[in-house]
Image (cartoon, rainbow, N blue to C red):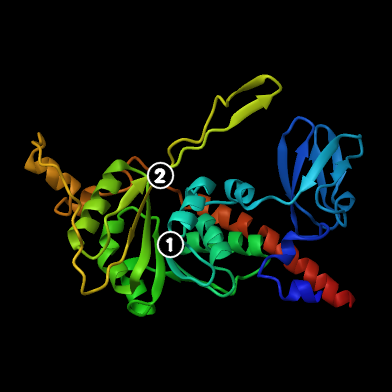
Amino acid sequence: MSEANSTAPHGAAARRGPFRVGDRVQLTDEKRRINTITLQNGGEFHTHKGVLPHEAIIGLPEGSVIENIDGFRYQALRPLAKDFVLSMPRGATVVYPKDAAQIVQFGDIFPGARVVEAGVGSGALSISLLRAVGDEGFLHSFERREEFADIARGNVSTVFGGDHPSWQISIGDFQDKVVELEEPGSVDRVVLDMLSPWECLDAVATVLAPGGVWTNYVSSVTQMSRVVEAIRASGQFTEPECFETLVRGWHVDGLAVRPDHRMVAHTAFLITCRRLADSADGIPKAKRIKEHSYSSEDLSAWTRDHDEQQWSAEALGERGISDKKPRRASRDAHQAVRVREAQNSDADSES
């Protein structure tokens, strides 16, 4: 390995240079159809247009245009992080790239930051957070389900070419484990992607340093309303800011310029706030006094006195996940890692 690669940030070397065995390659054909393969010795990519041997790709520079045995052409590039996240093995719904980008920016995830997140799901957000904190930072991820954590480990290892030195993953409930494993006031940023983040308010207030940013990722307006009211009621944080991000692509072909017929609209709401000093009293949001038509029962359903049993994935319209899906996703997530390890083992035995 060259001196430049040995001192490069973790995972950078795997994204540079010619294609190697174990690399994921995105093949785009003449009709803009995309297929992603993992390069293997003796491997072949088969379609109704013919066969493309992996050996025809290995050793070529990224961005090459390759012909299969029948003359059908493909453009070969390594997948970007956004491409990998949308196609990677998953056991749970991933955080979309548009939301991950906003979390990194509005959550102010900086190089060297100490960040905690929960739940990990399939590792999509973990990948973005690790890229942001870098080798000098630290990401501590909490996940309740071991099978999801295993999928995340495989996906993260695939992206970075192995275990990331700045990442630790712990199994258990965030609100219990984080106060055991992190010192009070030692965390710069907290990112929660979970069903009921208001249950973690005291834990977040304990570990988050004054001035630290807390970001919540929730899918429904009921969740957003409840976590905002809980944050306000605590008096330990600044006034929460809430928003969503909609992305609309455009079709551009000569004079035919128009919005795409499809767009990535609502995926989730983001809520951000900052930790106040322990001695500070939060400044309440100024409100105009006006009459409300909701009843005390309505108010209870949207605030902390609401029955916890009613806050379930099913009640919020989320589909359940079978045990078979995480097992299959875990196997697929570790495939590229196994191929790369096998190649390294063969190279060591030959040398």
x, y (%) of residue 59?
Answer: 88, 57
Residue at the image position 62 percent from the left and 53 percent from the top: 81
x, y (%) of residue 17?
Answer: 81, 60
Q: Which residue is mark 1?
A: 145
Residue at the image position 88 percent from the left and 53 percent from the top: 55
Which dot, 1 or 2, sits closer to the camera?
Answer: 2
1 and 2 marks in contact (CB < 8 Å) = no
Q: Residues within 10 Å of mark 2 (few under 14, many from 20)?
A: many
x, y (%) of residue 278?
Answer: 23, 74
Residue at the image position 32 percent from the left and 44 percent from the top: 314
Q: Earlier in the sequence, mark 1 or mark 2?
A: 1
Q: Is residue 151 visible?
A: no
Residue 210: image quadrant is bottom left
Q: Amino acid under label 2? A: Ala
Callout 2 secondary element: loop
Q: Is residue 125 left or right of residue 204?
A: right
Picture quarter with the C terminus: bottom right
Q: Residue furthest bottom?
A: 183
Disc 1 to disc 2, how far (Cα)? 22 Å
Q: Is residue 312 visible?
A: yes
Q: Residue furthest top?
A: 255
Q: 51 above or below 101? A: above
Q: Is residue 122 left or right of residue 49?
A: left
Q: Which residue is mark 2?
A: 268
Q: Amino acid under label 1? A: Arg
x, y (%) of residue 130?
Answer: 55, 65
